[in-house]
Image (cartoon, helix red, strand yellow):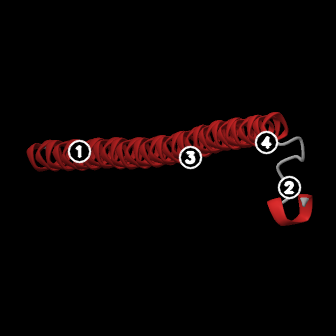
Amino acid sequence: ELAAGRMERERTAAELSAEAERERHRREQEREEAERQRSEGEEKRQRSEQERAKEEEERRAIARQNQEEAEAAEEAERQRLEEQRLERERRAAAEAEAFRRLGRQERMATADEAEGGYGAQTSPTEAA
């Protein structure tokens, strides 16, 4: 009977030991699974962060390009307006010069007519 009791206690101890080992193994698997999920979550978060950073950089690049294009368009428009202004000034100066020459020719013709009555285009030999 003592031997049977001892065998029963050993069997119970072995069962408890096996149960404890299974429980330890289960907890270890749960811990590993939690670590795997945490790791996957961290990797996913990092990928998302990298994608957001990449998208933000692309947005900044597009904004820079748009700004540069806008500045180039403004500069082109400024140059076009400056060229128009210079052309107007050249025309105004040419018209003023033409009026000045015309006025001088008219004054010369009037003076010639007053002196001899022949006009500015007639030479004295032609008049004689």
Q: Position of residue 113 (x, y in %)?
A: 85, 39
Label 4, label 1: how many angstroms apart (C-alpha)? 130 Å
Q: Judge by depth and name the residue closer to the eye, 3 or 90.
A: 90
Q: Position of residue 42 (x, y in %)?
A: 35, 43
Indicate which disc residue 24 carries: 1
**Amino acid bearing label 4:** Asp
The answer to whether marks 3 and 2 mark residues whose Cβ atoms lie closer than 8 Å is no
Q: Mark 1, mark 3: which one is toward the viewer?
A: 3
**Amino acid bearing label 2:** Gln
Indicate which disc residue 112 carries: 4
The residue shown at (11%, 50%) is: 3
Q: For the residue labelled by badge 1, is the local secondary structure a helix, a strand or a loop?
A: helix
The residue shown at (90%, 47%) is: 118
Q: How many marks?
A: 4
Q: Left or right? Give the position of 38 relative to 75.
A: left
Q: For the residue labelled by badge 3, is the local secondary structure a helix, a strand or a loop?
A: helix
Q: Residue furthest front?
A: 128
Indicate which disc residue 72 carries: 3
Q: Judge by depth and name the residue closer to the eye, 70 or 80.
A: 80
Q: Which of the two labelled residues, at mark 4 and mark 3, occupies the earlier sequence position?
A: 3
Q: Mark 3, mark 2: which one is toward the viewer?
A: 2
Q: Which residue is mark 2?
A: 121
Q: For the residue labelled by badge 2, is the local secondary structure a helix, a strand or a loop?
A: loop
Quadrant location of the C terminus in the rendered image: bottom right
